[in-house]
Image: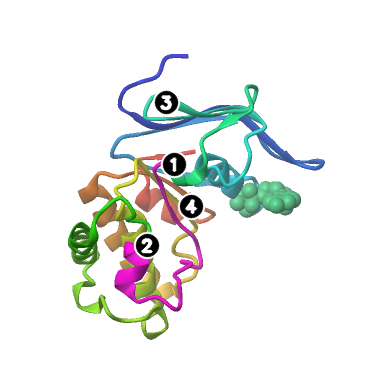
Amino acid sequence: MTTSTASALELHDVSHAYDKVRAVDHVSLHVNEGEVICLLGPSGCGKSTILRLAAGLETLQQGRVVMQGQTIADGAARQSVPPERRGVGLVFQDFALFPHLSVARNIGFGLTELDAAGRDKRIAEVLDQVDMADYATAFPHALSGGQQQRIALARALAPQPAVLLLDEPFSGLDARLREQIRDETLHVLKRSRTATLMVTHDPEEAMFMADRIY
Ligand code: ADP
């Protein structure tokens, strides 16, 4: 199969079973640089499993995962690059912020390759990107749901991941906030041109966010 240089993430003929449950059945997809792609479907159809396989949180049983032209997991060869070396950013439904760390330290957590000055600079940049520059010293419990979502996004973007993986990132927000945060998030993703694979069960959300829908 040919690999386009503009492709950030590819899944080739990926299948996955939990015991007897076939969660993913021969799925192929690709996300190009700068694209926002949605996986849309009802609960239980295997969307999160696809995201977890792309992230390396689940061991690949069958098929191949390719990032920026490099095979990072091969089911047949039983080879796999660990999650922390894949260059993926993750945002989950519950945001998963560290409650005992300030906003700045939450964002700085994954920036291990930078020195202290570089880390501070990058933290300031991403806080600015999500319009939260005044909240560096705040703690997660003092933030609204929408603000926590923005910090989770900032933390995922901080290491400049090759691919951002979002698992139902807005479903923890109340209906009033959801549209606004969705809109803001799309702006941030498009401005940073981060290749994004997002899971949702909400067709309207997929239509709003996605360049393409699977
Ligand atoms: P979705 O994200 O579309 O809701 P999932 O990928 O979470 O779907 O789940 C797909 C199927 O796999 C479901 O039937 C689910 O119950 C099953 N499943 C998911 N995770 C596990 C697991 N860790 N162990 C066993 N079964 C699982």
Marks 2 and 4: which is nearer the front?
2
Residue beneath disc 2: 109
Label 3, label 2: how many angstroms apart (C-alpha)? 26 Å
Residue assigned mark 1: 85
- SS at badge 4: helix
Q: Residue at x 33, y 70 (%)?
A: 105
Asked if labels 3 and 4 touch by Cβ distance under 8 angstroms, the answer is no
Q: Earlier in the sequence, mark 2 or mark 1?
A: 1
For marks 1 and 4, give the CA distance. Answer: 32 Å
Q: CA distance from mark 3 to mark 1?
A: 12 Å
Q: Is residue 26 left or right of residue 40?
A: right
> Is mark 2 in CB contact (under 8 Å) with mark 4?
no
In the rendered image, residue 184, in percent from the top left (x then y), is placed at: 27, 62
- Where does label 4 land, which residue? 203
Q: Nearer the viewer, residue 78 or 211?
A: 78
The residue mark sitting in front, 4 or 3, is: 3
**Region in magenta:** 87-109
Q: Secondary structure at mark 1?
A: helix
| Residue 39 locus on image (x, y percent) | 50, 44
Mark 4 Cα shell of 10 Å, populated few (<14), some (14-19), many (≥20): some
What's the amino acid at mark 1?
Answer: Arg
